Amino acid sequence: MLTHRTDVNGVCHGKTLVPAYYTATVFVREGKHWKAAFRAQSAIVDPMKAVRPAASALWTDGPTLTDADTQTLLRREQPMVTAWKDHDAGRMDKFFGPEMQFIDIFGDRIATRAQALKAWSGEGCDVKSFEFSGAKATMFAPNFGVLTYRASYDAKCFGQDVWPIWGTSFYVKHGDAWMWSGGINVLAGVDWATTPAG
């Protein structure tokens, strides 16, 4: 996975683009060549200036798939997010792979598992419940898969409501266990051309 910041000065359909964002691109090797298999971007914004997208409640992707791959990765994702809800670093640690990166809904990048464990076990968020919908796994190799889903929360982080997100998690199989190895979250329904910048 390659992550990078991009600064932008431009207009799209008459609207000024968000000036900066973080991108995550996953490459999969096919023969001698590395090919892009997934790409997403999260605008870099000031959380105190962010506005809930008007379409956030409408952005869905149908029902969660019932195939074995989707259900296998969901069985890892749900207890891991529950551990985040409970501020339990010990439980989260059991789901993390040895290396990882993560980009959140405000374009903040976490570069190591130690940073993630510290940030996600802190007291900044009060999460009562969460719900996944539209989950789907895409398997690019026997030991690598991507899980996408929409998540909604009854929660506050640093005093602000947590809005629905489109989540993506990257899983790598180590032995018999699928380990969370990175991800990127994007605000559901976000309009990049009108998102307030930090």
Image: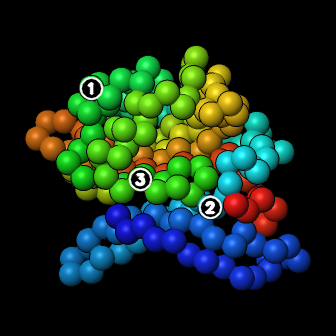
Q: Residue furthest left?
A: 175
Q: Tag 1's secondary structure?
A: helix
Where does residue 8 sit, x and y in percent of width and height? 66, 79
Instruction: Look at label 1 and name its amino acid.
Output: Gly
Q: Residue at x 48, y 48 (%)?
A: 168
The mark that comes first in sequence, 3 or 1, is 1
Q: Between marks 3 and 1, how big is the CA–CA gap? A: 18 Å
Where does residue 52 sit, x and y in percent of width and height? 77, 43
Whether tag 3 and tag 2 are in contact, CB under 8 A, the answer is no
Q: Residue at x 71, y 82 (%)?
A: 9
Question: In which quadrant of the rendered image does the C terminus lie?
Answer: bottom right
In which quarter of the view is residue 43 placed? bottom right
Residue at label 3? 110
Instruction: Look at label 2 and name its amino acid.
Output: Ile
Residue at label 1? 90
Q: Nearer the viewer, residue 98 or 31?
A: 98
Q: Tag 2's secondary structure?
A: loop
